[in-house]
Amino acid sequence: MRFTDKIMYNLKRGLPALAIAGAGLMASCDKDEPDPVPPSTQHDVELKWFQDYYEEIEPTVIKVHAHDPYVRYIYLSVVNDGYFENYAPLNIENMRKALDSRIKIAPHKIRGRGNMRFKPGAAAKEDSLWYVKQGWTINQHNKQR
């Protein structure tokens, strides 16, 4: 079988197209990143704390969970109905700073959960807005069933 037809092509167009296609293939093969963890194997972690009990939310504990690829979210859950009515405005601000340093460990993973009960007017506006932005509620009434 002989090919007698001449195929006309222009090298000015063909070679750059081949170079771009080859570079695209080479770039896609260079990835040495590990495969991401499938969402079906991830889980959430809930760390509980209350007024004078911060043991579960110590920075070292949070760092362990934050670096675990199988942990999707870390919830800092306030327990004992979040009773902080005896806290002065300075205590509320200091608690916000302590929690903020823990959230900054992994801001994309760590969220607040639960209701915080402060004396009305005790929390400064910027403090209460920060708590709500992080996921906690403030002075929310329990619904009776």
Image (cartoon, grey):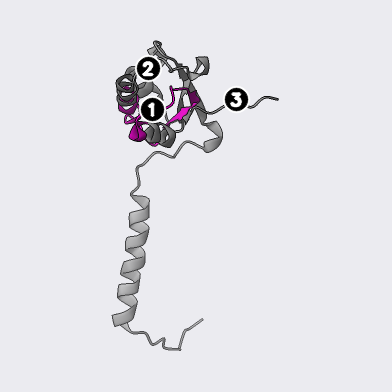
Task: Specify the quadrant of the image occupied by residue 95.
Answer: top left
Which residue is outermost to the front? 121
Residue wearing tag 2: 87
- Confirm or deny contact between disc 2 and disc 3 (CB under 8 A): no
- Mark nearest the camera among 3 and 1 is 3
Identified by mark 2, the residue type is Tyr
- Of pointers 3 and 1, the one earlier in the residue sequence: 1
Identified by mark 3, the residue type is Asn
Q: Residue at x 32, y 31 (%)?
A: 104
Residue wearing tag 3: 142
Cα separation, mark 2 vs mark 1, equals: 30 Å
Give the secondary structure at mark 2: loop
Give the secondary structure at mark 1: helix
Identified by mark 1, the residue type is Ala
**Any part of residue 88 in sight:** yes
Quick check: 20 left or right of 45? left
Task: Quadrant for the C terminus, please.
Answer: top right
- Asked if residue 65 lies in the magenta stretch, the reply is no
- Confirm or deny contact between disc 3 and disc 1 (CB under 8 A): no
80 up-or-down from 4: above or below? above
- Asked if residue 119 lies in the magenta stretch, the reply is yes
21 up-or-down from 129: above or below? below
Residue 56, image x, y percentages = 41, 15
- Of pointers 2 and 1, the one earlier in the residue sequence: 1
Residue wearing tag 1: 66
Residue 20, image x, y percentages = 33, 67
Magenta segment range?
98-127
Residue 55, image x, y percentages = 39, 12
